[in-house]
Amino acid sequence: MKTRSHLLKTLATGVCALAVAAGVADQPLNTLTAAEKEAGWRLLFDGKTTQGWRGYGKTEFPKQGWVIEDGCLKKVAGVHGGDIVTEAEFEDYEFSWEWKLPPKANNGIKYLVLESRPHAPGPEYQMVDDATEPGAIHATASFYAVLPPGPNVKPKPMGEWNSSRLLVRGNHVEHWLNGEKVLAYELGSPEVKAGVAKSKFRNAPGFGEKCKGRILLTDHNDEAWFRNLKLREFPAEKR
């Protein structure tokens, strides 16, 4: 039988957890908490400027196709501006972001991106209206066209915000969606090589292997919203 003190302690813990959750929910957009700063996180988007970003293969940020609206980096539907990339390159890191798409829209985050390989810049964390994309290797949170996510993928309805996370550490990669790990794989593994061999990237040297590269937001011509883009780096893993 639980004692009164135990029940009070449990209740207090629950109240504390709710307070912490409320504090996170009330956190201003595109900011870091003291704990995040202590853990080494940094913002990749400040909610006000495009500082730190430029066009893929370009020296400047696109003059059209991308705008800052309501503290978000927004891809404007039907206006071609081109893909955008971080000015900085990363090797071992954890990256988190929030995104939303309207119905029937398609977008993606690419990572370990090389500008010397324009037809296959890097692996893509797919973000899409799954109702329009047949096949698991094209589903939300897949390694696009190469590896499917697991069965625990639960994207929010189109028009609502999703929370995603990407971990790259050594050859190990993880895709997370709304708090659940939905895919884990090893760069350069037989599994990845087999998936690449069956994909449109089969003739791209080094695709699916570890490298130091940029993060890319795609221009699929559809509307897409991004906010709270945060990253923390780890010491490079020996391979």
Image: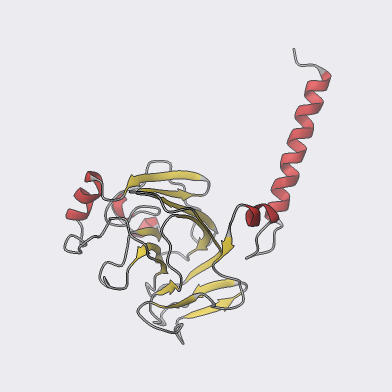
Among all residues in the image, which is located at the extreme bottom? 63
Q: Is residue 171 above or below residue 121?
A: above
Q: Residue at x 44, y 84 (%)?
A: 62
Q: Is residue 210 above or below residue 120?
A: above
Q: Residue at x 43, y 46 (%)?
A: 153
Residue 38 location in percent, x, y?
Answer: 65, 53
Residue 209 location in percent, x, y?
Answer: 28, 55
Q: Residue at x 69, y 63 (%)?
A: 28
Front position in the image: 209 or 142: 209
**Viewport quadrant of the N terminus:** top right
Residue 216 location, quadrant = bottom left
Residue 145 location in percent, x, y?
Answer: 27, 56
Q: Is residue 176 above or below residue 29?
A: above
Among all residues in the image, which is located at the extreme top? 1
Q: Is residue 94 above or below residue 43?
A: above
Position of residue 17 in the picture relative to residue 162 (left or right):
right
Position of residue 103 in the picture relative to residue 3 (left or right):
left
Residue 33 location, quadrant = bottom right
Query: How is the protein colored in the picture?
Result: secondary structure
Total marks placed: 0
Residue 138 location, quadrant = bottom left
Front position in the image: 235 or 121: 235
Residue 215 location in percent, x, y?
Answer: 42, 66
Q: Residue at x 26, y 50 (%)?
A: 188
